Amino acid sequence: MSVNVSITVNGKPVSAEVDDETLLVTFLRDHLRLTGTHVGCDTSQCGACTIHLNGDAVKSCTMLVAQADGCEVATIEGVSDGETLHPMQQAFKDNHGLQCGFCTPGMIMSALDIVKQNASPSEGQVRDALEGNLCRCTGYTNIVRSILAGAKEMEAS
Amino acid sequence: MAAAEPLNTGIGESVTRVEDSRFLRGLGNYVDDIVLPSQSYAVMVRSPHARATINGIDTAAALASDGVLAVLTADDFSAFGGLPCGWQVHSKNGDPMTEPKHPILAEGAVRHVGDPVAVVVAESKAQARRAAGLVDVNYSEGDAVVDLQLAASDGAELVHSDTPSNVCFDWELGDAAATDAAIAAAAHVTRLELVNNRLVPNAMEPRAAIGDYNSANGEHTLYTTSQNPHVIRLLMGAFVLSLPEHKLRVVAPDVGGGFGSKIFHYAEEAIVTVASKLIGRPVKWTADRSESFISDAHGRDHVTTVELALDGDGMFLGLRSTTLANMGAYLSTFAPSVPTYLHGTLLAGTYTTPAIYTNVKGVFTNTVAVDAYRGAGRPEASYLLERVVDLAAIETGIDPVELRRRNFIQPAAFPYDTPVALTYDIGNYQATLDMALENTDAAGFDGRKAASAARGKLRGRGIACYIEACGIAPSNIAGALGARAGLYEAATVRVNPTGSVAVLTGSHSHGQGHETTFAQVVSDTLGIPIENVDIVHGDTGKIPFGMGTYGSRSIAVGGAALSNALDKIVLKGRQIAAHLMEASADDVVFKDGQFSVEGTDKSVGFGDVALTAYVPHNFPLETLEPGLEETAFYDPKNFTYPSGAYVCEVEVDKDTGVIDIVEFHASDDFGNIINPMIVEGQVHGGVAQGVGQALMEGAVYDDNGQLLTGSYMDYCMPRADDLPNVTVSNHVTACTHNPLGVKGCGEAGAIGSPPAVVNAVINALSDYGVKHIDMPVTAHKVWSIMNANGN
């Protein structure tokens, strides 16, 4: 069965008719070609598909696109200002908070949510809040360092 | 001309990564991101049984399902070979290993859960998935052979009915008689039985492949998540599908981590390549994570008995080990090399043990194939050695630091021939251990232990020293040991007319940062900023030859090839510059981007020389060809030998058994370092995987061969709050036989950390008389031990 959805993605309105079984992540990747949102597992454990839905970080593999009808969605592609990186993205670059880059978009989206909840989190709070995001490359040391640095930069700016 | 400004993008600088800007903006180009015109989708039908006979496959319902373009079974692949094994070892009696066929799709029988039986290709992935459920496979299930020791015993059911036993090879290395004599004469012998737990590599990007056949020119293109596109071209082209190499292009674009699991040639690569030609459209396959668990090669899985003989002064006299190594149901690409030459040859570790003997049996079981995973054999060697040394320290009453110190190979002893076939070129094991101890306040441990005790915690401190052999080499020796491939690397440096540079490298980056590190080598040598350097990798259509990235070989072998190609560029550049300055090439020196005539103020910039090469109006055409492009193939003289010392402190909760790593320091010797920031990141990641192995990860099969840890719900991946802040330090002894003096850093963390962590936990539990706990050392195991001991 098909269903009509209207969503605002990265500030732009999008309407489409899709199969009602379509996941939000599939819609973003396959229909809109926003391939920065990744699929790393099929059990909602890894967080590579994390996006913002009405301002909150959610896993886009865990909901149907129909459930996002009428919502505001933000993906990694909307975070930077063109070539200029967002302070959180810049903090990841400066602190070597990524290696293969596959988990990175989800990490950035979670990091922005962490800072939204708590403008100056402690290291322990960041580690706890990253519970839903897996990275196999970095060992998290530099991701945590990046998020702490990004939070500082965002607070200052 | 004035000399160029000093650059900050050369060797030794922590240059931030060139590749990050695209990854951070979601603009990476991973295989699953690629959509080709008319692309179709493949879904595999996989065996739910670990061992069964296939009586028949009914594909009619699936073929009739919406959107289905094809349903393929083994019959469609009968013209092709099986998946090849790239390394042949011999048993101690001289017999070659048993090498059963590994069909692309199961032929008449399945041998592990996940063995591919059929493939459905449809207009959409959802349609392919629905139709896959309609493929009716008639199985007769048999008794699975799962337990390693049972599989190796006489009378066991056979994984391959046409092989004489489940033992693939019965291999040995070292001097058995001398080791027996050393053990018989010893003042003390420490014995230990241990398991090196089976791991699932779990790169965050699941494997994916797209086959794209072009009927106009007969060319196949395969996009695949590979660490090794040139080797896939060789193996799949020459040995599986009989495609001439010039008609097969393999592209491995951005790849989301590998850790070994993406070195190998997998069935799905051949399947999509064949399917694309059959249906005349591109065919994409992307694994689900649950599918990855039962189709990616696993790592480790050894059961070992080890004995260490010591004299009255604690000097090591002999080491003997006996290991059963799980091969899984089939031989993956490099599987036989891992428990043999990558494991047995490392059993001297950093010590002067005069007599060593090891016997390793590779055993087939009804489980997923096991192959190289981060460290590949070397973590297993390091683990058994550093555990038995720690146990020997406990048993002899000699401090574990002192025991290691007494037995270290001394700096003056290099080059050092071990009794297990290697020649270490250089190292300083005492220096890294001293550095690690200084950085972790060894003297303050008793105070910290008392403070922990006051909070109901048992504090332990563990040390592990490791050595690894990176950059498998040279090709002639590797060939004599069974490698069926050369182990060189190739690099082409293409200087463009305007002075920018493209490097075509056979190394492949899947997180290691080659686009930055390799560019730094160019920047340093040619005196140009890295913005002017483009590192091209991962496409056999652009890069003539290569051998990929694994075994920490990129900078030591690929970087060395690059360095040699750059030397050729400078050599030709000097000849061009000499002509321009009307000097002898012998008098021209190159520094900071300037060619100068020694003893004069004559100078010409690199960019001018590059332009002259391509606009040869004023050029010595009678002696020199136009253009400025050079290729180097580099075949190393020896392995490189990174080494180091890791110190771990843990707190164990007395009530719950929960282990908290409160300090972890890695002190390594990687030789010269190109980018300290990237090297530190590699160590962090390696340590995380090693800590995962030590404390939480483990693939578990039931007696029927069902993988109980088949998803992230059941397989415990380390998360941010499981891991410590890892601190690092480096001592440098430059490699003596490659032009950059580099060694390799990608696997060190995963090699050194498991014994450091387990030694720390055993130390914390010293009051309970615990001698050993097998990995993963879970809170439940620790809690059970404490309870059994009357906590």
Image (tube, coloured by chain):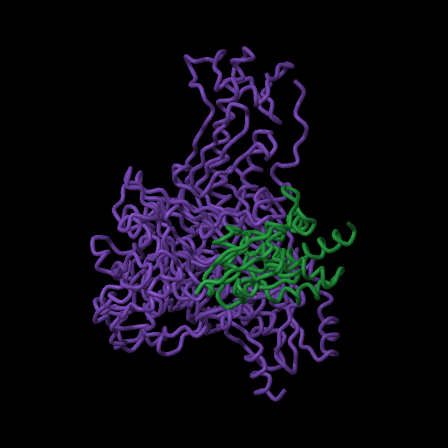
Chain colours: A green, B purple
Horizontal relation, residue B724 to residue B316: left or right: right
In the current view of this chain or complex, which residue is farthest to the right? A156
Residue B346, x across and y down, in percent: 46, 57
Q: Eyeballing the image, is B392 above or below B273?
A: below
In the current view of this chain or complex, which residue is farthest to the bottom? B790
Residue B715, x across and y down, in percent: 49, 70
Horizontal relation, residue B680 to residue B417: left or right: right
Horizontal relation, residue A17 to residue A70: left or right: left
**Which residue is painted at 50% across and 33% down in the image?**
B502
Residue B635, x across and y down, in percent: 41, 40
Tell which of A105 and B759 is nearer to you: A105
Question: Which corner quadrant holds the N terminus of chain B?
Answer: top right
Q: Eyeballing the image, is B709 above or below A123?
A: below
Quadrant of residue B125 in the image? Answer: bottom left
Q: Eyeballing the image, is B35 above or below B403?
A: above
Tell which of B545 and A130 is nearer to you: A130
**Which residue is painted at 49% across and 45% down in the image?**
B554
| Number of marks | 0
Residue B690, x across and y down, in percent: 54, 63
Question: Which corner quadrant holds the C terminus of chain B?
Answer: bottom right
Horizontal relation, residue B238 to residue B380: left or right: left
Q: Eyeballing the image, is B395 above or below B176?
A: below
Is residue B360 visible to us here?
A: no
Tell which of B517 and A108 is nearer to you: A108
Is residue B84 visible to us here?
A: yes
